[in-house]
Amino acid sequence: MAETTWPGERLIAAARRGDVESITALVSGSHPHVRRFARSLCASPEDAEDAAQEALIILYRKIGTLRASSALASWMFRIVRNECLRRVRRDVPVPDLSTSGLLANSAEDETLQRLEAGRIAAAIAALPADQRHVLIMRDVQGHSGRMVADALGLSLPAMKSRLHRARAAVHHALQGE
């Protein structure tokens, strides 16, 4: 049976003090939870595995900076969320109009573009996993509707319905801010 609880307070406290065996046990005990969260948030299984690994590396390196043992789960989830968002931003192409000769962006324009990309990535990350996967595969990665439906084991109308709901939710989130 799979472990359903996070590592205990004593183990976390010992890891925070620098005990190597405790840090090792903490990382391995946290791995299933971190991986499950990454799978629900990231666009692809590969990104989820990479995000989980990055989060565990950060846990290993920075466990001493954790202020309260009870905050481990929320700290790790925040790290995974940020890593998944970073991966989404990495995959979203930002057109460079200055090299095409059409427009030279000012520092202010570039900052506004980054802020807007961050808002979009956050809105996508807030979607339910089924809608997020469809939206990312179709609109971000550019796969055909049939390919997305097949990859996710959906009928084409079901995929279209999820895609519509995802787009509407992202639009609503961006309009509401």
Image (cartoon, helix red, strand yellow):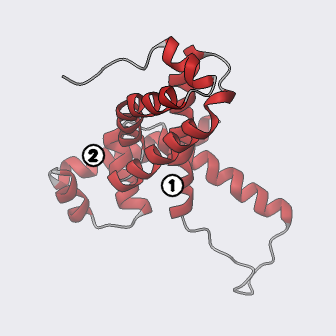
Please tell me how many numbered marks the rendered image carries. 2
Q: Quadrant of residue 131?
A: top left
Say whether residue 125 is left or right of residue 104: left
Q: Is residue 5 visible?
A: yes
Q: Which mark identifies residue 88? A: 1
Q: Is residue 62 above or below residue 57?
A: above
Foreground pick, 56 / 145: 56
Say whether residue 1 is left or right of residue 69: left
Q: Is residue 165 visible?
A: no
Q: Contact (CB < 8 A) between labels 1 and 2?
A: no
Helix, strand or loop at mark 1: helix
For badge 1, the amino acid type reads Val
Residue 132 position in % (x across, y down): 38, 45
For badge 2, the amino acid type reads Ser
Q: Quadrant of the N terminus?
A: top left
Q: Is residue 119 above or below residue 104?
A: above
Between circles 1 and 2, the one closer to the viewer is: 1
Residue at image point 66% right, 52% down: 116
Q: Is residue 109 above or below residue 1?
A: below
Residue 45 position in % (x across, y down): 33, 51
Say whether residue 26 is left or right of residue 3: right
Residue at image point 26% right, 62% down: 145
Helix, strand or loop at mark 2: helix
Residue at image point 45% right, 39% down: 169
Say whether residue 73 is left or right of residue 115: left
- Crowding at dot 2, Cα within 10 Å, few <14 / some 14-19 / many 20+, comes out as some
Q: CA distance from mark 1 to mark 2?
A: 22 Å
Mark 2 lies on residue: 161
Residue 64 position in % (x across, y down): 66, 28
